[in-house]
Amino acid sequence: MAGRDAGVGTPLTAGGVYRGWVVVAAAFSVLFFAYGLQFSFGVFVTGMSAELGWTRAQTAAPYAVYVFAYGAFSVVTGRLTDRHGPRPVIAIGAVLLGLGWGASALVTQPWHLHVTLGCVAALGMSVTWVPCNATVSRWFTRRRGTAVAIASTGGSLGNLVVPTLAAALVAAWGWRVTLAALACTAALSMLVAARHMIRDPEAVGLWPDGAASAPPPSPAGSGRRLAEVRFTWPFMLVVAMYFMTWVPVFVPFVHAVAFAEDLGLGKIAAASVLTAIGAGGVVGRLASGWVSDRIGRLNALLIVFALQALAFILFAQARDLAWLWAAATVFGFSYGGTVTLLPPLCGDLFGRAHVAAIVGMIFALAGAPAAIGPYFAGWAYDVSGSYVAAFYASAAFNLVAFVLAGVLLALIAARRQAWHE
């Protein structure tokens, strides 16, 4: 096996580059196409509503089911990734993702979208975030935050590029053809990237970070199982703070375009709000990973939770495109930071051997309820004709997440002091 990976049949390094960076690039590609497609949904909301006669809440409800389902399914895909490796898991998911989103272009009734998007596409989407970021976490220890940040930036770049492209294509082709084309492109690209996803460096005779020998065990243990950590205070606090920040996190992705159109902006200008989220996300993911390697994961999380609360307040006050861009950029930065920091945080706290299962469980418990946010915002709009209440509620949720992160930081500091004593 020396020098080659039997499963892939290519050199372990290319030009002296550590093989882990190839895995990072593959994860980046998967996340770019999957999240670029997912975050384009807001572009299709008004077209669906107008053609099919659905209310905003009816249009958002299947997407809420999708968010819940792919978060819940992450428990399974995380375990499967730990057991079988990421390559077959991501490949199967790519096919399901393409089928689900592609079939969504054919819907005529709300229940159709519940099946195609809320079930089939959700199964496919569940193979992206947890398997990709958990796999990258296994390949690095010293540079874990930076590596996960680079990989996860694919999601924000997808958010930056694809929604604006989708809006232009909708204007030319209509929402149905555009959705089908994006679904096929995403599925094929993910299948290519999956070929380069390898479970961990040990599978090909390497060590994390390209080290010449095995790293020493971390204080948290070299790899604690989910059953060992799921009832501990650190695990439960991580779940609680991510629950609070993720409940409202999809509100801008689903409703920001419609909100901008309600303010009198055209389709392309409104879609640029999603592009601003993506631009902020690119910077937020890269910055949070790099900064967290230096000041600690929880200190970095305190910053991004505070910024996300600020972003929702800015959305509530927005009255023109410039204000929306400011809110969207801050939101993208903070959202990018929160999602980037979870896998490295879990790797630090619980070790890397079973990190996919642990991150998958947290993603399910905290991420699946994010389905509530878009539906609540749609309902609030239908009742009041405004998204302002939903934006302020979202800010409050993030302030609670900030407090919980502070509690976890204090708990860890107290335990470290006890170890030294």
Image: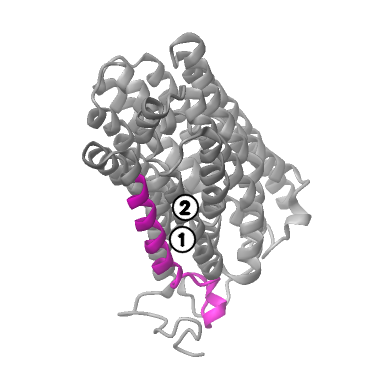
Residue 111 vs residue 35: left or right? right
On whether residue 133 falls in the magenta region, the answer is no
Residue at horizontal 52%, vertical 54%?
A: 124
**Towards the viewer: 421 or 172:** 172
Residue at horizontal 37%, vertical 35%?
A: 44
For marks 2 and 1, give the CA distance. 7 Å
For residue 349, say whether it is visible: no
Q: Is residue 362 above or below residue 247?
A: below
Residue 8 image label = none
Disc with the residue nearer the chain's start (2 vs 1): 1
Residue 351 vs residue 194: left or right? right
- Label 1 is placed on what type of residue? Arg
Badge 1 is on which residue? 143
- Label 2 is placed on what type of residue? Asp
Residue 253 vs residue 134: left or right? left
> On the image, which quarter does residue 16 sit in?
bottom left
What stretch of residues is rendered in magenta? 179-208
Confirm or deny contact between disc 2 and disc 1 (CB under 8 A). Answer: yes
On whether residue 187 falls in the magenta region, the answer is yes
Residue 293 image label = 2
**Towards the viewer: 121 or 366:** 121
Looking at this view, name the residue that lies furthest to the bottom: 2
Residue 295 vs residue 156: left or right? right
Q: How many marks?
A: 2
Q: Is residue 188 above or below residue 408?
A: below
Residue at horizontal 46%, vertical 29%?
A: 308
User: Secondary structure under badge 2?
Assistant: helix
**Where does the image place residue 172, in percent across and percent down from the top left?**
21, 40
